[in-house]
């Protein structure tokens, strides 16, 4: 199908996408990824750590036409997950329902609407962190924002607290103008705020030092030198986004009835209480409390490991019983619990909570 035959479809597609609840929508043509060389260099430095899935299908990441042969265009969308809510031990994005599930359903609805509008089947596929695509590259080309120095895509009216998704289609659509400006200017707040120095240069993240990687993707022991900088963070980290001036000014609150609002198991729990609950949580309780949650990615053992680190950082002698019970858990959890107990006991019985 030619561009001329579908030109009037673009405004309707965007209106339908907004109607489905997406906060940003843009269109781009598929082709060679502009950031492919930078991505390969990032991998060669070892910055991906144990995320072995990232080098796989590297050739497909270099050209966005390859993941879905026959695809010509991408509708790129963004969904706000809230940046105004109070900071806490769990990153904003992970407090509610799994964004993969929420966004894929909506993108498939959009796909179905397009097929209905054209009166025929249309080859297409929805991607939300689920395939060999450089999503930020597509999003910038679709006009949704620029690459911030914290490596997140930043939109001038929304900040960076949003998820990205893409619907690849065989039809040729008129692309939007790419976002060409870099509006970070001389600001380096994100680089200076990172407690583990994971941002080794503007727009370069050493994931092996990033708290999100350490508490989510890393399946083994957290390096000793990086445990204390984790502070009170149990799952993920928003620090480099929290300090961004664009988020301070423009990040919106979650709308009413958002699927990304904090679930009951989290609520506004303070770090120590949540850490103790996780350490004592059974597998069955975990399945019930975190059904449909992105936090399942770390598995219960990973969350218990993280909880022990947090208590080692900010806990008091009152938290020792939960850590002592964790000594009988599997070796990964037990080692971190023992480390935390040494820290707490070393501070003395009257030291109180460290902050």
Image: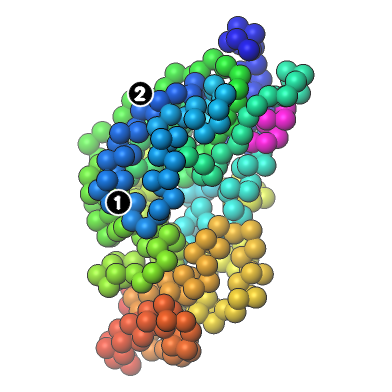
Q: Secondary structure at mark 1?
A: loop
Please provide percent x and percent y for residue 198: 28, 54
Task: Locate residue 62 relative to residue 26 in the image: left or right.
Answer: left
- Of the 4 image quadrants, the one containing the C terminus is bottom left
Q: Is residue 354 above or below residue 41?
A: below
Q: Which residue lies under the disc numbered 2? A: 180
Please provide percent x and percent y for residue 37: 30, 33
Q: Is residue 13 visible?
A: yes
Task: Name the outermost residue toward the bottom.
Answer: 349
Q: Nearer the viewer, residue 352 or 100?
A: 100
Q: Is residue 220 above or below residue 27?
A: below
Q: Which residue lies under the disc numbered 1? A: 47
Which stretch did the figure color magenta? 107-113
Q: Residue at x 34, y 76 (%)?
A: 313
Task: Locate residue 257 relative to residue 144 in the image: left or right.
Answer: right
What type of secondary structure mainly makes up the magenta span? helix
Q: Which picture quadrant has residue 231? A: bottom left
Q: Nearer the viewer, residue 47 or 56?
A: 56
Q: Residue at x 31, y 39 (%)?
A: 40
Q: Residue at x 46, y 57 (%)?
A: 91
Mark 2 and mark 1 in contact (Cβ < 8 Å)?
no
Q: Secondary structure at mark 2?
A: loop
Between the residue at mark 1 and the residue at mark 2, the CA separation in whole angstroms equals 26 Å
């Amino acid at each position: 199908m030619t561009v001329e035959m579908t030109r009037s479809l673009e405004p309707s597609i965007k209106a339908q996408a907004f109607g489905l609840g997406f906060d940003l929508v843009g269109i781009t043509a598929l082709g060679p990824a502009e950031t492919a060389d930078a991505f390969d260099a990032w991998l060669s430095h070892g910055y991906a750590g144990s995320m072995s899935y990232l080098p796989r299908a590297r050739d497909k990441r270099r050209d966005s036409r390859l993941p879905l042969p026959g695809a010509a265009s991408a509708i790129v969308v963004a969904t706000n997950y809230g940046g105004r809510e109070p900071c806490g031990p769990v990153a904003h994005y992970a407090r509610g329902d799994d964004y993969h599930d929420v966004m894929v359903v909506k993108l498939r609805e959009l796909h179905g609407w397009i097929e209905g509008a054209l009166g025929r089947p249309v080859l297409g596929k929805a991607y939300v962190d689920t395939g060999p695509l450089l999503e930020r590259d597509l999003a910038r080309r679709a006009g949704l924002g620029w690459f911030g120095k914290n490596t997140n895509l930043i939109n001038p009216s929304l900040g960076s607290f949003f998820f990205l998704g893409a619907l690849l289609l065989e039809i040729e659509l008129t692309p939007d103008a790419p976002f060409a400006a870099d509006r970070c200017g001389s600001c380096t707040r994100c680089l200076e705020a990172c407690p583990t120095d994971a941002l080794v240069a503007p727009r370069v993240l050493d994931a092996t030092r990033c708290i999100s990687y350490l508490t989510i993707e890393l399946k083994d022991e957290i390096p000793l030198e990086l445990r204390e900088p984790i502070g009170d963070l149990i799952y993920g980290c928003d620090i480099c986004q929290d300090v961004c001036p664009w988020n301070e000014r423009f990040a919106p609150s979650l709308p009413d009835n958002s699927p990304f609002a904090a679930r009951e198991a989290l609520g506004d729990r303070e770090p120590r209480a949540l850490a103790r609950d996780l350490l004592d949580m059974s597998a069955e309780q975990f399945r019930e409390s975190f059904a449909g949650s992105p936090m399942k990615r770390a598995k219960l053992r990973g969350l218990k490991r993280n909880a022990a680190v947090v208590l080692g950082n900010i806990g008091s002698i009152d938290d020792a019983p939960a850590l002592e019970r964790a000594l009988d858990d599997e070796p990964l959890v037990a080692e971190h619990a023992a480390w935390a107990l040494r820290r707490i006991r070393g501070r003395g019985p009257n030291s109180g909570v460290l902050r």
